[in-house]
Amino acid sequence: MKYDCERCIKTGEYKKRVCFLKHKEIELNVPDVTESSVREKSELISWERKKCTKEDVIKILLEVHKLLPNKLVHDVMRFPLMRMGLKHNEVCPMGLFDYDSNFYIELETAASKYHVLPYEGAYLDQPQDIIEAFTVIRAAEARYYNYQSSLIKQKSSESPNSSKSKRR
């Protein structure tokens, strides 16, 4: 798993990321979340430096999502951030979740990995909140993989054309 807190802390990976589990407030370059800061509904063009808490980052991500609904929150969190002299940090999503969200994500991950449901019985015997949480998690995961797949297809379709033009 890319965002495993134990591994991250052991290896020191958290020093290269913005980790709200390790820090309560971090100075970040954050996007200006006004209509005028968006170019053609595709990218953010205006940034400002400010100290942010976890709640501030969540609020900014929600505002960016309103302005750029086709941009995944995961990619917004990976925009270049400058912190402690390092470039290209990313906000680690694990620190943004609350206890309940982490619980449901870990439960769904384990259920998928081991092919078992959390409670005894069939699918319809599971509590409604777990079924709803799993549905949301899987939908978000599918959207992320579809988005990544479309980026790969876009890059691969551009690459043969660009290599042909270079040969001529």
Image (spheres, rainbow, N blue to C red):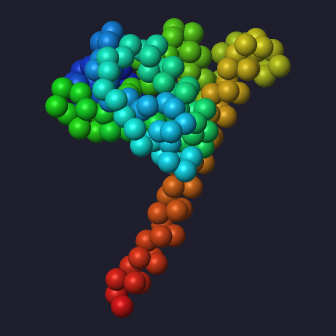
114 is higher (above) or lower (below) than 126: below
Tell me where residue 12 appears, x and y as whole percent: 22, 24
The answer to whether residue 59 is seen in the rendering is: yes
Q: Quadrant of the N terminus?
A: top left
85 is higher (above) or lower (below) than 42: above
In the image, 108 versus 17, the foreground residue is 17
Q: How many marks?
A: 0
The answer to whether residue 78 is seen in the rendering is: no
Q: Quadrant of the C terminus?
A: bottom left
* Quarter-of-image position of residue 117: top right
Residue furthest right in the image: 124
41 is higher (above) or lower (below) than 164: above
Residue furthest left in the image: 85
Tell me where residue 153 appears, x and y as whole percent: 54, 62
Give the residue displayed 37% in from the left and 34% down from the top. 47
124 is higher (above) or lower (below) than 33: above
Tell me where residue 160 appears, x and y as whole percent: 45, 76
Residue furthest front in the image: 36
Tell me where residue 44 appears, x and y as whole percent: 45, 41
Query: Is 29 displayed left or right of 114 in the figure?
Result: left
Give the residue displayed 27% in from the left and 24% down from the top. 14
* Quarter-of-image position of residue 65: top right
* Quarter-of-image position of residue 139: top right
In the image, 34 versus 143, the foreground residue is 34
Give the residue displayed 51% in from the left and 11% down from the top. 98
Give the residue displayed 49% in from the left and 20% down from the top. 58
Query: Is 102 displayed left or right of 47 in the figure?
Result: right
